[in-house]
Amino acid sequence: MQSIDVRLSDLAEKFGCELIGENICVAGVASLSSAAHSDLVFLNNEKFIDQLIHSKAKAVIAKSNEKLPLDRSYLICRDPVLLFALIADYFNPRPLSQASIHPTAVIASDAVIAPDVEVGPHVTIETGVILSSGVQIKAGCFIGANSVIGANSILMPRVVVYSDSMVGERCVIHSGCVIGSDGFGNAWARDHWVRIPQLGRAIIENDVEIGANTTIDRGALDDTVIGSGARLDNLIQIAHNVKIGSNTAIAACTGIAGSAEIGANCLIGGGALIAGHLKIADKVTILAGSAVPSSLSEAGVYASGVPVVPHGTWLKNMVHFRKLDELAKKVKHIEKMQVAQQTTQGESSDTN
Amino acid sequence: MQSIDVRLSDLAEKFGCELIGENICVAGVASLSSAAHSDLVFLNNEKFIDQLIHSKAKAVIAKSNEKLPLDRSYLICRDPVLLFALIADYFNPRPLSQASIHPTAVIASDAVIAPDVEVGPHVTIETGVILSSGVQIKAGCFIGANSVIGANSILMPRVVVYSDSMVGERCVIHSGCVIGSDGFGNAWARDHWVRIPQLGRAIIENDVEIGANTTIDRGALDDTVIGSGARLDNLIQIAHNVKIGSNTAIAACTGIAGSAEIGANCLIGGGALIAGHLKIADKVTILAGSAVPSSLSEAGVYASGVPVVPHGTWLKNMVHFRKLDELAKKVKHIEKMQVAQQTTQGESSDTN
Amino acid sequence: MQSIDVRLSDLAEKFGCELIGENICVAGVASLSSAAHSDLVFLNNEKFIDQLIHSKAKAVIAKSNEKLPLDRSYLICRDPVLLFALIADYFNPRPLSQASIHPTAVIASDAVIAPDVEVGPHVTIETGVILSSGVQIKAGCFIGANSVIGANSILMPRVVVYSDSMVGERCVIHSGCVIGSDGFGNAWARDHWVRIPQLGRAIIENDVEIGANTTIDRGALDDTVIGSGARLDNLIQIAHNVKIGSNTAIAACTGIAGSAEIGANCLIGGGALIAGHLKIADKVTILAGSAVPSSLSEAGVYASGVPVVPHGTWLKNMVHFRKLDELAKKVKHIEKMQVAQQTTQGESSDTN
């Protein structure tokens, strides 16, 4: 990462924001605490003003410069996080393909590989694979027969793509991901399981990013599809025939069972469990640790995670939780008795 | 997958089912929606009849042809999913070993490798390993010293098998699996952890299938054992000394802690957590997202997953959940008071 | 593992414990059930005395020999598990570096590699990497540009370390781990996600052990840090900017969200979910399956996992759980009525 010096006025023009203060140069982005004089930082929340005061950074992205130190320069915008992301990417773009095939890579003679593709050491590329322009296949990846990787996609080291998979353009797939492995399909035959061959494909549309060690199974008969622009974190399980809508973001450790259809623009928190054969509407937010056993047809925020309490409290609560039905029945009975008493008492009072 | 044309009467004879309708040829299997004219489909549920009417498929596996379109041919059987699995496998058998050792594989000179074994590119096979007849070790796998892979087992790309592990016959292990890694054994020494060497083995019996990125630790002193015919999905954690009974099926994202013994023919839903040092009986079903803290000695269905509700409802519920014990005590107190009142009221009424 | 015969008196001297009984030789350690005559076993709990009686082992580590068979020799100590760990490690030390670079490894010409380093087959080591003395990089690992691996650390087969990561001394990282992959950083731009470049590092301090297929993201701007002596089990997700304190042990399948700070000497059970941007104090224990949505400032034991019940019970309980707020309101109403009744009744009684 060699540093390039850029004037704030140039950034303001390029990214459509307002410069307030001295038109200094910046050489990169940083956090408030780690910034050097030449770094650009962002302030998204007033509670960090104190950190800003102690930061070495001279240039700050913020919503406004009200109440902020006068000795800094500001790039003012509606969404500091977004502007910071765009400028951070400007200073630190993803590296381009080195347009070279490492001699240790094992590549089927009939694979179609664009001239500017990068293939790293110890990669295996099987028959019929297509690697489009600008693709980067890093060390140790495996691309199974007849799979297609779209233009400018990057597979980080040790990604496995099973046969017949489709990865779109500008995707990034992190290390250890397995794309297109067999779905969990078994039929019970009196005393043993018979596998149901998994004949569908795994299709990753354009602009998808997938975290480390996430697994995406191929479809059973039809396809598993990750919609364009989706973001998947690490260690996520996507079962066969799942459809994930465009721009849906899913945090780590989430499991989505077979044939679930998740809408577009959903936010799914970490460690969520989503059952199979259900539909989740667009713009649904599911908080971390929640379990979704059936369809959610309305946009909105849903939750079921259970927060920790001290162990002693938990033990006492659990006694009653395990027999919540009994407690509810007791309350119902008490209500009935109370009504009866009121009546009796009313009568009793009447007789006075 | 070149297509082979097969008469329905031949399938009926081979798989012991009844043909109703014209004895046409089929070339493969498909889903109702994606089927071509030459595909065989299955119907397991009357709610899909409409899809069948619109399907191009001419041949259908079903329990009966009652109420079903007259212009199709039917293979009638008791269990359409099972018959479909068997016929799908007939059309799409697992590929056989290519009986070739890739020149990039690094193989210890004393490894015992049957003549018809397939070893892919960039594989490492250490000293003392035995690969039995028909074994397929796909690209990038690692087989540690003295491990044994039984006849006709398939290790998909980038599986790691640590030393001294045993994999049975006809197993399939998907990409990214780690078999025989160290269990989580640590002893506390006042101010730091001391590792407890993990000296047992990981033993995978015959006909086991294991999904992508699942981890199975070796035993601490004795062995970890996955029983014959078991089915494990993706991203499952099996800790040291766990025993999984025959034909037990475990869905993705489940974690099983050390020394747990799971019976045979169990069904364990996704994202389950099973504590260590417990026993689960045969034929136990544990629904997705459940936590099992102690032994289950009776066959049956168990659950503890908590389903989502709208966030507002959840917030209100959680207030009370955190002090469920208080609520229960309140109810108990009310009950007592009610009894007391009844008595008083009774007396009061008596005095009238 | 060739066996070495050691006198119990030598072990007693070396590890500071007391020998009671005959000063025999032992050749290794084992479990009670699998021990041969020459094995040393341990007894941590009186409930296993019966197993000891039937064990072939002649030498036993125990807290005292009271009530124990007279025909065995004992090493008496305060903490049998710890002594067993130390002696097991003495008999089964981690193998040392073989001080050899496999010819199939692809190593950048400017990587700095100590003379006694072991690099296995199919390893890739990029520019600027430093491998310190005694390091073992097993088959198929990838070490990204400018990463540093400290002295005597071991990376098991197929570990991926992204660029600019730091691994301390005497660490062990198991197969399939991904260290330093991009954190899950995305900014929403009206109709699509913009990635937030992940510019921090992943830092693993000294004496850390990390289980198979665990993922540790690099920091967004600052660093992700796993403190010295920490123990991480398999399939754990550590998000960007997380700090894990020294000697904290985390069981499998746990997810820790971005910027969480976990104290030192914590114990975190399996399948826990810890939210981002919170602080957990030192010496906090979180039981398996718990969710931590906010900071825990006091040492102690916390829980929220929900244990299984038979499915029928669960269904009935869930009806009420989903409307726990209603139940609580009902109880409040009943209480009020009861007080009102008491008053009325009191008055009513008074009028008698």
Image (cartoon, coloured by chain):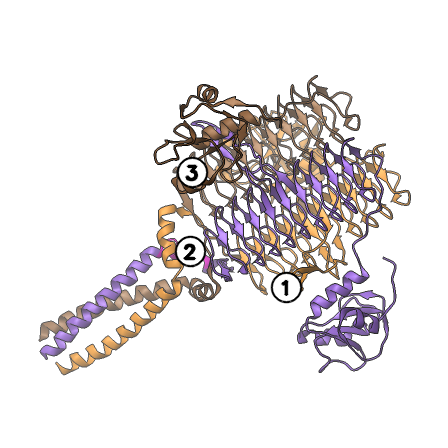
Chain colours: A purple, B brown, C orange
Furthest toward the right, the residue is C109
Does residue A82 appear to the left or right of C149 in the view shown?
left
Which amino acid, by three-letter code, is at mark 1? His
Identify residue type, mark 3. Val
List x then y, in percent, for residue A324. Answer: 36, 56
Residue drawn 42% across the image and 59% down it: A317
Q: Chain of mark 3?
A: B
Q: Please, which chain is the residue tagged with disc 1 on?
A: C
In the shown orientation, is residue C314 left or right of residue C205?
Answer: left
Which numbered tag is attached to residue B196? none
Residues under labels 2 and 1: Cα distance?
Answer: 28 Å
Res. C126 image quadrant: top right
Indicate the secondary structure of the residue bearing disc 2: helix
Q: Disc 3 designates what residue? A: B284
The extreme top residue here reads B115
**Residues drawn in magenta:** A314-324
Residue at image coords 80%, 38%? C123
Q: Is residue A330 above or below residue C39?
A: below
